């Protein structure tokens, strides 16, 4: 008998981390011995269906989403930081509605590798905890989320981010430095100038790859940074890399001598590949991964110069082993 599984998350927006997680998740489900039919809710259903060879419907097609949840056996919500209102209360309400429909129709619910919170709105926080109490299996990627759920009497377990499960090919180093930026309030003109000064100081003789991992949010700030580099040094070799496949992004990161990065999954890939990485702390998850692996990290404009100096003077010893997500346990929860 075919098991029907719906997957809801921040999919179809060309976000490198989320799309990589979805690819890993769907590949594992396809490899399970049970016969499965996967339906992904995506903002770009045709593109997602073509890339992953799964059934897709538009995330915002209400009738189709309701129908899919009604007919499925299990809803998987995640991974990523879906249940929070820091980015947008609207997105939180959307993911809560998805969970509510699964509860309403009596479906098995799996919360997959998520970070929960912060949720500032008390009403939305109450609704979130009420719905999470109905979930059958919850895996979380950080201690803060675990403590939040424990405080509300909800059972969950810490898991490794699924991207740790990637099998990365060791690439030959090619005298390249990577810079990965995203648009956010801390990345203003002063920050870009200070960052450009340090890149020019330490890496002016290398090829500089400025990586855009979600074009809608990253590309403009990457181009502005490229302009700052050329103002300081017209001879520097700096290229903005955008509109590439996830596999190409991973290959590019693996080939670097060092990576200075804002996005969590860019840092993760670099650590996994043994690339020396300097995280830029724009979000608690980036600070968490930096502290987990005892990495130097940029914590605002004030300490950029000092941090870059320490980063370039310290010896980097890549971690030998990193924990991976337990997909065997997920299989048991999905098909038991």
Image: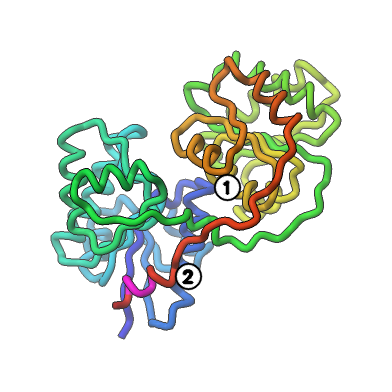
Q: Which residues are magenta?
A: 330-334
Task: Give the camera-side residue of 52 and 167.
Answer: 167
| Residues at marks 2 and 1, CA–CA distance in whole angstroms | 20 Å
Q: Find residue 134 and report its horizontal and vertical position in percent.
A: 18, 58
Q: Is residue 169 above or below residue 244?
A: below
- For discs 2 and 1, the disc positioned in front in the rendered view: 1
Q: Is residue 81 magenta?
A: no
* Residue lying at 18% horizontally and 52% vertically, measured from the top left: 131
Instruction: Please give the residue where the numbered disc 2 appears in the rendered image.
Output: 28
- Tag 2 and tag 1, C-beta contact below 8 Å: no
Left or right? Give the position of 217 relative to 90: right
Residue 190 percent location from the top left of the image: 60, 13
Q: Which residue is mark 1?
A: 268
Image-quadrant location for residue 181: top right
Question: Residue 240, how many percent across, how many down?
Answer: 69, 35
The colour scheme of the drawn protein is: rainbow
């Amino acid at each position: 008998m075919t098991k029907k599984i719906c997957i809801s998350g921040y999919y179809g927006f060309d976000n490198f981390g989320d799309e990589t997680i979805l690819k890993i998740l769907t590949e594992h489900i396809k490899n399970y011995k049970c016969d499965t039919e996967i339906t992904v809710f995506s903002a770009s259903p045709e593109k997602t269906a073509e890339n992953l060879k799964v059934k897709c419907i538009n995330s915002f097609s209400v009738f189709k989403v309701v129908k899919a949840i009604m007919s499925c056996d299990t809803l998987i919500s995640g991974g990523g930081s879906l249940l929070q209102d820091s980015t947008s209360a609207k997105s939180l309400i959307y993911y809560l509605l998805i969970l509510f429909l699964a509860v309403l129709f009596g479906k098995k619910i799996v919360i997959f590798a998520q970070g929960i919170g912060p949720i500032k709105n008390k009403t939305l926080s109450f609704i979130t905890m009420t719905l999470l109490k109905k979930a059958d299996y919850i895996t979380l990627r950080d201690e803060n989320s675990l403590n939040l759920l424990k405080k509300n009497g909800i059972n969950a377990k810490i898991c490794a981010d699924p991207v740790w499960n990637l099998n990365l090919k060791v690439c030959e180093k090619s005298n390249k430095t990577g810079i990965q930026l995203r648009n956010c309030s801390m990345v203003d003109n002063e920050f870009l100038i200070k960052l450009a000064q340090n890149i020019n100081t330490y890496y002016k003789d290398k090829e500089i790859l400025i990586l855009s991992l979600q074009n809608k949010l990253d590309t403009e700030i990457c181009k502005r940074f490229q302009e700052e580099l050329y103002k300081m040094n017209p001879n520097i070799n700096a290229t903005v890399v955008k509109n590439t496949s996830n596999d190409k992004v991973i290959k590019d990161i693996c080939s670097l001598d060092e990576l200075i990065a804002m996005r969590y999954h860019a840092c993760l890939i670099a650590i996994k590949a043994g690339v020396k990485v300097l995280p830029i702390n724009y979000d608690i998850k980036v600070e968490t991964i930096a502290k987990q692996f005892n990495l130097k990290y940029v914590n605002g404009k004030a300490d950029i110069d000092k941090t870059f100096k320490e980063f370039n003077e310290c010896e980097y010893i890549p971690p030998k082993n990193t924990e991976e997500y337990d997909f065997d346990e997920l299989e048991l929860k999905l098909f038991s």
